[in-house]
Image: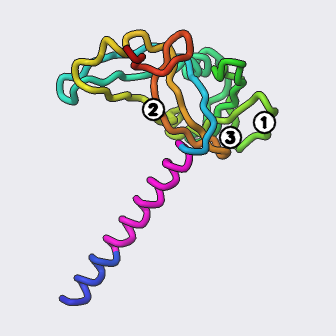
Amino acid sequence: MRNKKWIIYINLLIILAVASAMIIKKEKTIKHGQIILLELYGNDPRSLMQGDYMSLSYQIEADKRAENSEEMNARGYYLLERDSNRVVHYLGCENEKPQVDSNQVILKYYNYGDFGGESYFFEEGSGDDFATARYGGFKIDTGGNPVLVGLYDDKFRILPLEK
């Protein structure tokens, strides 16, 4: 019986260590990553069960579907070109990590195109502050791992705007 307790404690420590490492990695990306803006393709600003949130989809996903190329792998990279406003535009998908030019970035995807950031939760009753959202703002690390950090309007300002 004592051995079983030790196994439970060791597993618990492993789970906590992995979770802590993931949190530290995301915090590092938020602090040191470069910001990119992905154009929103549509949103749904309400969930009765979860409170106010916006379900997000992105233009690059629509561009990929319109491309009519071969099936994408379950995991890979979006190759994107960044403009002067930090907005990125779809260039293609790669199965392996591609080399990029100075105005290009990669965005790692999982699950056949998902990269995170499909939902953005906000304080209940503040949905009108996010109604003008046009872009999802992400911080990405050099490996293309994204973290959604906010929503932006058509003038590239983070929402909600100060009143």
Q: Residue at x 30, y 80 (%)?
A: 7
Residue 50 is drawn in which quadrant? top left
**How far apart are labels 3 and 2 at the CA level?**
21 Å
Region in magenta? 11-30
Query: Which secondary structure lies at badge 2?
Result: loop
For disc 1, the marked residue is: 100
Q: Earlier in the sequence, mark 1 or mark 2?
A: 1
Q: Is residue 40 visible?
A: no
Residue 44 is drawn in which quadrant? top left
**How far apart are labels 1 and 2 at the CA level?**
23 Å
Instruction: Name, please, the residue furthest toward the front.
Output: 163
Binning the other alpha carbons within 10 Å of mark 2 as few (below 14), some (14 to 19) or many (20 upward) gives some
Binning the other alpha carbons within 10 Å of mark 3 as few (below 14), some (14 to 19) or many (20 upward) gives some
**How far apart are labels 3 and 1 at the CA level?**
14 Å
Query: Which secondary structure lies at badge 1?
Result: loop
Q: What's the amino acid at mark 3?
A: Asn
**Mark linked to residue 12:** none
| Residue 55 image offset from top left, x and y in percent | 37, 23
| Residue 1 image offset from top left, x and y in percent | 18, 88
Q: Is residue 29 above or below residue 80?
A: below
Cβ atoms under marks 3 and 1 closer than 8 Å? no
Q: Is residue 120 magenta?
A: no
For disc 3, the marked residue is: 95
Binning the other alpha carbons within 10 Å of mark 1 as few (below 14), some (14 to 19) or many (20 upward) gives few
